[in-house]
Image (cartoon, helix red, strand yellow):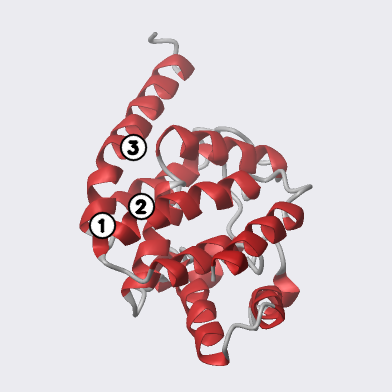
Amino acid sequence: MKQVIKNCLSYVKTYFENESSGHDYFHTLRVYNLSTHIAKQENANIEIVQLASLLHDVDDYKLSKSTYKNKDHARSFLKENNIDIDTINLICNIIDEISYKGTDSVVPSTIEGKVVQDADRLDAIGAIGIARCFTFGGHHNRVMYDPDIKPNLIMNESEYRNHVSTTLNHFYEKLFNLKDLMNTTTAKQLAISRDNYMKEFINQFLNEWNGIK
């Protein structure tokens, strides 16, 4: 299995070579490292967690709509590396459950899924989360901030995916929710300082926007 993990690291590095929306190889690598750390603390199956975390974005709806439903890229890699069908289905189910989908978001059915979801969400908050949020907004030509455009705080999966707003609104529509949606004790502890940092940043941003500081 160590060789499969090594192959997977090489695969995702090539796959995300030209990705610049914030869902790049280094995001995958951070989620992999966070997942491994959390899995050790929460007694999850580390190899399952590592493979799911490495492959969690290769069929992401935002990046590959045509393969999203069946997880074609993940399945193809795992089959080529002789992973049995039950394990493939388990990993693909983890990948399917971890995404944020507004009010349609789910709590993963396995501890491994909970670990990967937590790691992915941890990378969406804090200093890295701020940087990724503005990177994604710029990549999609979104307005940074417009005080006349209010955040939509309650959206289902379809509304969330099709919603176009400002980058700053994304903090209110998703990122500020993530701390309280962590599944594992380890992730809950890690999320506190990241959430606080984000909120301090937004307060500073708005103060500067309004000319107070």
Observer-nearest residue: 148 or 25?
25
Q: Position of residue 184 (x, y in %)?
A: 25, 60
Q: Position of residue 82 (x, y in %)?
A: 65, 83
State the image quarter where residue 167 is shown: top right
Q: Name the amino acid, label 1.
A: Gln
Q: Secondary structure at mark 3?
A: helix
Disc 3 versus disc 2: nearer the observer: 2
Q: Name the amino acid, label 3.
A: Arg
Residue marked by disc 2: 37
- Pointers 3 and 1 in contact (CB under 8 A)? no
Q: Is residue 179 visible?
A: yes
Q: Residues within 10 Å of mark 1 (few under 14, many from 20)?
A: some
Q: Is residue 150 visible?
A: no
Q: Position of residue 47 (x, y in %)?
A: 45, 69
Using the image, tell me which numbered label, if any, was put on residue 150.
Answer: none
Q: Using the image, determine if residue 82 lies above or below residue 5.
A: below
Observer-nearest residue: 4 or 193?
4
Q: Using the image, determine if residue 100 lies above or below residue 199.
A: below
Residue drawn at the location 61% of the way across and 52% of the way down: 164
- Pick whichever of labels 3 and 1 is earlier in the sequence: 1
Quarter placement of the C terminus: top left
Residue drawn at the location 54% of the way across and 65% of the way down: 2
Residue marked by disc 1: 41
